[in-house]
Image: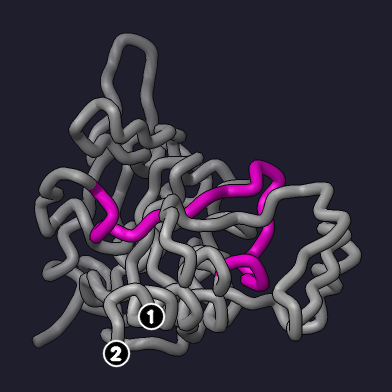
Amino acid sequence: MQKSEARADYYLSIAQHLVRPGYDWSAKYKVTIDLDEGNEQDRSEQLPRPRRSDKAINDVMMDMEIAESEDKCEFMDFSSVPFDVKKRSRSCQICNYEMRKPKWKGVVMCMNHGVRLCTAIMPPRSDSLPELYQLNGEKVIDYSWTCPTKTSCWNKFHDYYLPKGLFSKKEINLAENTMKFGNFIYSSDLYQKKYKALGIEVNQQDEGKKKKCMGRIDFTTHTRG
């Protein structure tokens, strides 16, 4: 198989994962495609697409149905980055937040919001492993801090976590020759719910005093085995 064809198949698999069944994309983007001639007419809005110029990829992406966002976000895979990115900076940030095992496969970047998101369809965290435990050893039963929908992390971010203010925004600029991603806002309502669900006491800020226990959560502290 030609290299360009392999990349095209890769992006097609992403499209299949991120598709929204039943959504009338042709009406949304006013696109008509002649499958025999490969012609496109009356395209009034640009569909999200990766930053690639290969014709084989562009042909696939022309009919791609990535979840929409108001910002019409573009995604990019790490193989397209013109410099090395450390492995720890290539894992899915939503999987990290939901305290799943680290995921690197199928992870792409949202160029507009500066976050790393995997494209695999997964069940809600409450129905997934590993089980989580509070600091007192009891199982976590409150998952109100996670997205309740079975979908990809790309969709979770744009449809759920972004509107709820979980992340800071950092638009990716490859000209900087370094990757700076958006991060969790620990004072957000969702992250405060996460602390509570895991049995982590967070001292609210009193006048003249700093907040305590605000920051990253140790994954191994809340899992077994």
Q: Which residues are magenta?
A: 61-81
Residues tagged 2 and 1 counted as in contact (Cβ below 8 A): yes
Image quarter of residue 134: bottom left
Which quarter of the figure is the C terminus placed in?
A: bottom left
Helix, strand or loop: magenta stretch:
loop
Q: Is residue 64 something one can see in this rendering?
A: yes
The kind of secondary structure element at disc 1 is: helix
Q: Which amino acid type is shown beneath numbered disc 2?
A: Met
Q: Tell me the distance, in whole angstroms, between the alpha carbons under discs 2 and 1.
A: 7 Å
Identify which residue, 197 or 164, lies in the foreground.
Answer: 164
Q: Residues within 10 Å of mark 1 (few under 14, many from 20)?
A: some
Residue 126 position, x and y percent, is 46, 82
Residue 201 position, x and y percent, is 30, 49
Residue at the spot 75% in from the left edge and 85% down from the top edge: 36
Which residue is identified by label 2? 1
Image quarter of residue 223: bottom left
In the image, 34: left or right of 224? right
